[in-house]
Image: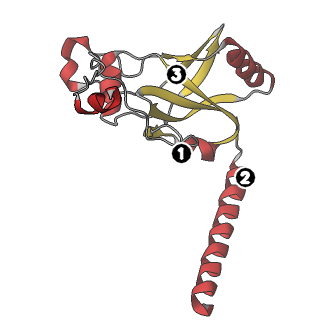
Amino acid sequence: MSGSTAATEPTAVVTAPKPTRATPKPSAKKAGEKPAERVVAENRRARHEYEILDTLECGIVLVGSEVKSLRSGRTSLEEAYGRVDGDEVWLIGCDIPEYEKANQLNHRPKRPRKLLLHRREIRKFAAQAFEKTLTLVPLKMYFKNGRVKVLVGVGRGRKAHDKREKLKAASAKRDIEIALRARTRGGG
């Protein structure tokens, strides 16, 4: 009989209290997907002027008005280069124009900026650059997960005849691709 009375009696429902702080939602990203990158500046001329042997992503020390200026997409890496000074790497000649709304708290547009690298990376790059007379060249500057990153390459300067050979090879490759596309369209 006790089983029949339990079925007719209302049961109390106990619920857990709601959390006071919102828990972050699980990320919709897939496991193999890269984090979002937004390119601010790219030094395309560097790939023409230098034979890039190795690249490394590094952080950069900036002030607030520089970040604001970068977010508006205004910077130039054309005349920039990297320099190893003791245990530090500096980006010299990178032009980040002043942010108009920062008035007296603005930055100098072409000031040297410190690059953030691990000591072992600094030693490796410094050794390569010093032994083989190579140059540290910034290839691109971009935002990654809200932080500014610089892709720095170690490169050897190309001679004029090397540049001509590279252009000739690229032109021949382009012509071959166009001919193949025309062949597949005409025959298909």
| Disc number lying in front (3 or 2) | 3
Give amino acid for label 1: Arg
Tell me if mark 2 has few (under 14), some (14-19) or many (20+) residues whose alpha carbon lies within 10 angstroms of its own: few
Residue 99: image quadrant is top left
Q: How far apart, in angstroms, are the residues tagged by discs 1 and 3? A: 20 Å
| Disc number lying in front (1 or 3) | 3
Earlier in the chain: of badge 3 and badge 2, it is: 3
- Regarding mark 2 in the picture, which secondary structure is present there? helix
Of residue 40 and residue 126, the one placed in the foreground of this image is 40
Lateral position of residue 22 relative to residue 136, left or right? left
Q: How far apart, in angstroms, are the residues tagged by discs 1 and 2? A: 19 Å
Residue 147 is at least partly visible in this image: yes
> Residue at left 44%, top 30%?
145
Lateral position of residue 80 relative to residue 118, left or right? left
Circle 2 residue: 161
Of residue 57 and residue 137, the one placed in the foreground of this image is 57
Number of marks present in the image shown = 3
Circle 3 residue: 59
> Residue at left 52%, top 29%?
150
Circle 1 residue: 44
